[in-house]
Amino acid sequence: MTAAESILVGQSKPMRRLRQTIATVAPARVPVLIEGSTGTGKELAASLLHELSGRRGAFVAFNVCAVGDTMFEDALFGHTRGAFTGAAGDTPGFLREAHGGTVFLDEISGLPLPLQAKLLRAVETGVFRPIGSSRDAMSDFRLVAATNEQVESLVAAGRFRADLAHRLSGIVITLPTLAERLDDVPMLVEHFARGVTVTPGACRALQERAWPGNVRELKQVVDAALVFAHGVLDADAVATALTHRPRTGVANVTAPSMLADDYLASERRRLLQLLDGAAWDTDRAAAGLGIHRSTLYRRLKRLGIALPPVRRAREQCVVRDVRPDSHAFALIRAN
Ligand SMILES: Nc1ncnc2c1ncn2[C@@H]1O[C@H](COP(=O)(O)OP(=O)(O)OP(=O)(O)O)[C@@H](O)[C@H]1O
Ligand SMILES: [Mg+2]
């Protein structure tokens, strides 16, 4: 098994084609846009792009939706000492931290229009202005962006600049949904079962589902089934795990715009209560809901709930040093 096969698991035709594309595209410096529904493996694909790029700098990942407008600029471009109250020292910002490496901007569709202009300049020229600085800074970074909305429709709706969309989409990689590659389910289940024997009946039961939450949802069900499995992951353990799924399906989570206003208001109250109970620890809150942190952030954004700034910045920024001896498995564990 190649390193790529052990990261992006699956031998279906779409997956083999995907790994092939990633391997071909990785060494080039062109920006890559990864499109795909929630849970299809966009972040994993981005880290594999970096792993195979030969770029020795860091892989810096961050979620655009998780930081407010001013925080975004600060996070990306950095600031000089005294640029604003509390700016005690110079901060390089992610673009400079990713010098010689890769910047991964997740959920790029959430980027406000004024910041899109600033990002465009940075992507086009590698040059940007840290907050409070009188001089431009430079960085040799490779940009990978991800979205689960189609960028063309965002442009058509006036929510995304056409020039930036064009620039980011040097190469577009579209991840297949799990429903399009159900023959990969047994292999993914083995992968998530980490050595526990999986019966053919369990695999069949898992293969018969639609998986609106894609691989993430499959992983959650397998994790739950492992709790109920007594040494062997069988159809019974799967059935039990499935009866303990959260009642709000993933389809509801990703399409709240379809829901009535009063539903949104009660959803907002419920989330605020949950966050309070979790001391605003978003990891804990997301785990409580059985959803991924980025899904939680999306929901918060849609419901107009802002996180305290310090919390947001700290939680959403992942800098992974990529040393020559680093191994791709570390990335999986970091996930
Ligand atoms: N092909 C795959 N092989 C193994 N694990 C996978 C695969 N695709 C996804 N996963 C796992 O599924 C989970 C979701 O993947 P990831 O976070 O990359 O999805 P995403 O597309 O970024 O989702 P979202 O849009 O909700 O952020 C992770 O735990 C990831 O490790
Ligand atoms: Mg993601």
Image: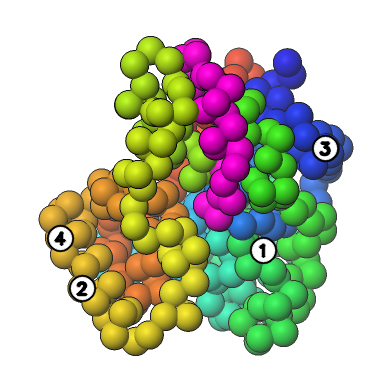
The label on residue 269 is: 2
Q: Is residue 228 left or right of residue 274?
A: right
- Point out the frontmost of discs 1 and 2: 2
Q: Give yes or no for contact between labels 3 and 1 (Cβ–Cβ under 8 Å).
A: no
- Identify the residue position indicated by label 1 in the image: 122
Which mark is nearer the camera, 3 or 2?
A: 3
The residue singled out by tag 4 in the image is: 276
Question: Tag 1: residue type?
Answer: Ala
Q: Relative to residue 231, is residue 37 drawn left or right?
A: right
Q: Looking at the picture, which amino acid does disc 2 mark? A: Arg
* In the depicted structure, whether residue 111 falls above or below residue 244: below
Q: Of discs 1 and 4, which sits in the foreground?
A: 4
Q: Nearer the viewer, residue 207 or 108?
A: 207
Q: Is residue 200 left or right of residue 276?
A: right
Residue 101 placement (x, y as % from top left): 65, 40
Label 4 to label 3: alpha-carbon separation: 45 Å
The amino acid type of the residue labelled 3 equals Lys
* Circle 4 residues within 10 Å: few <14, some 14–19, many ≥20: few
Q: Earlier in the sequence, mark 1 or mark 2?
A: 1
Near-viewer residue (127 or 64): 64
Sequence-first disc among 4 and 3 = 3
Q: Please state which of the two labelled residues, at mark 2 or mark 4, is closer to the viewer.
A: 2
Residue for badge 3: 13
Q: Which type of secondary structure does the marked residue at label 3 adopt?
A: helix
Q: What x and y, as percent, mark residue 102?
A: 64, 44
Residue 54 seen in this snapshot: no
Residue under the image location 74 percent in, 62 percent down = 168
Image coordinates of residue 51 in percent, x first then y, are 67, 31
Residue found at x 35% / y 35%: 240
Q: Residue at x 28, y 65 (%)?
A: 307
The quarter in which the N terminus is drawn is: top right
* Crowd band around label 2 with a 10 angstrom C-alpha radius: few (<14), some (14–19), many (20+): few
